[in-house]
Image (cartoon, rainbow, N blue to C red):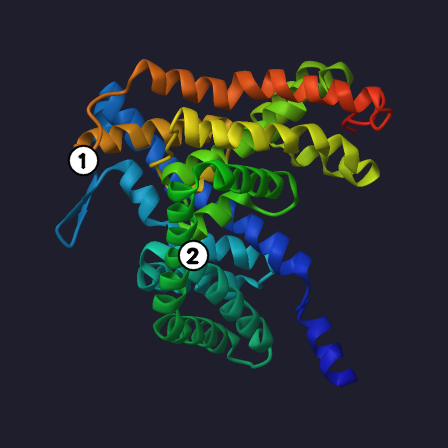
Amino acid sequence: MEKVKGFLKKKDIVFSVKRYGIDALGAMAQGLFCTLLIGTILNTLGNQFGVPFLKAVVATVNGTDYTVGGLASAMAGPAMAVAIGYALKAPQLVLFSLITVGFAANALGGAGGPLAVYFIAVIATELGKVVSKETKIDILVTPLVTIGSGVAVSALLAPTLGAIAMKVGDLIMLATNLQPFWMGIAVSVLVGVALTLPISSAAICAAFGLTGLAGGAAVAGCCAQMVGFAVMSFRENKWGGLVSQGIGTSMLQMGNIIKNPRIWIAPIVTSAITGPLATCLFKLQMNGTPVSSGMGTCGLVGQIGVYTGWMNDIEAGSKTAVTAMDWVGLILISFVLPAVLCPLINMVVRKLGWVKDGDMTLS
């Protein structure tokens, strides 16, 4: 047993929630952001503003035309796998071999590809690390083991993992449609909390394909956390904190939350209010890429996702036009209500003596 532990330590293989549930999942979201999300934004800009370069076909592969954004989106699988490998501290040969593994897992996983890529990339990375630099022909053995195991596991498990992810996502979306009030609260609170925790709400939403009303509730929860923390901590963090949290991430408050968990009350209560408002009153749907559901106001990706969804719905014929109510709902849920409600709720918490000056100061 000691030899096994020593070998795993030498290979930097660590079985922990942090390594797999935080580091790998967070890296996967970054891989998605740099490909699928950026590709979607580029396509939206090209179509809505008529940018010739962004609308032009730059490559044709097997009869499929690709724009710049289309090429970026097509690389989502490889990017996620490489990002996961990087987070797991994969050696170079393992890291580069994951390009093929990610492509296979994402393609075979279908709509639930992100979840398939996550599990399979982790397996392939750790197996590749086991054999890395153990032979004199490492340049052959390591890629063969990494790619061979990754593609084999993809063929065996990716379709099933993808189907499970989509089934779970469909159940969440169905439940939200049937019970928009209670599920609006649940989805908004849970995804918002995930956004502030050192895990990836974007990766979770992408893995389960959360769109529609459930996606709208997720956007509401994320915005409540980001804009809420940014505004209610303004006295401590001024404009730098407003920007870094409001369009960056509320995860910056995690250290302060550990010191005083009660500073989290106002954003969570706010998300419990804005979530059902999004689903029941404004009927806010996020029908862009699922990863946008878990991004909130980070780079305004959540709002761009909602807008992209509107355009997709209009093109598909399920929506006739973007109405004034659509814009009012998006602006109120994303910015105005979190900026107003969260500080007001926090005032009550402060009067109770649970939060004091300096509790939300960013270092």
Q: Position of residue 14 (x, y in %)?
A: 68, 67
Residue type of the residue flagged with mark 2: Val
- Exactly how many numbered labels are in the figure? 2
- Alpha carbon of mark 2 to alpha carbon of mark 1: how far? 25 Å
Do labels 2 and 1 touch, CB within 8 Å?
A: no
> Which residue is the site of mark 1?
316
Q: Which quadrant of the figure contains the N terminus?
A: bottom right
The reply to whether residue 158 is in sight is yes
Q: Is residue 343 left or right of residue 210?
A: right
Q: Secondary structure at mark 1?
A: helix
Judge by depth and name the residue closer to the eye, 33 or 236.
236
The residue under the point 37% across, 56% down is 166
> Which residue is the site of mark 2?
168
Q: Secondary structure at mark 2?
A: helix
Judge by depth and name the residue closer to the eye, 270 or 26.
270
Q: Is residue 49 above or below residue 154?
A: above
The reply to whether residue 248 is in sight is no
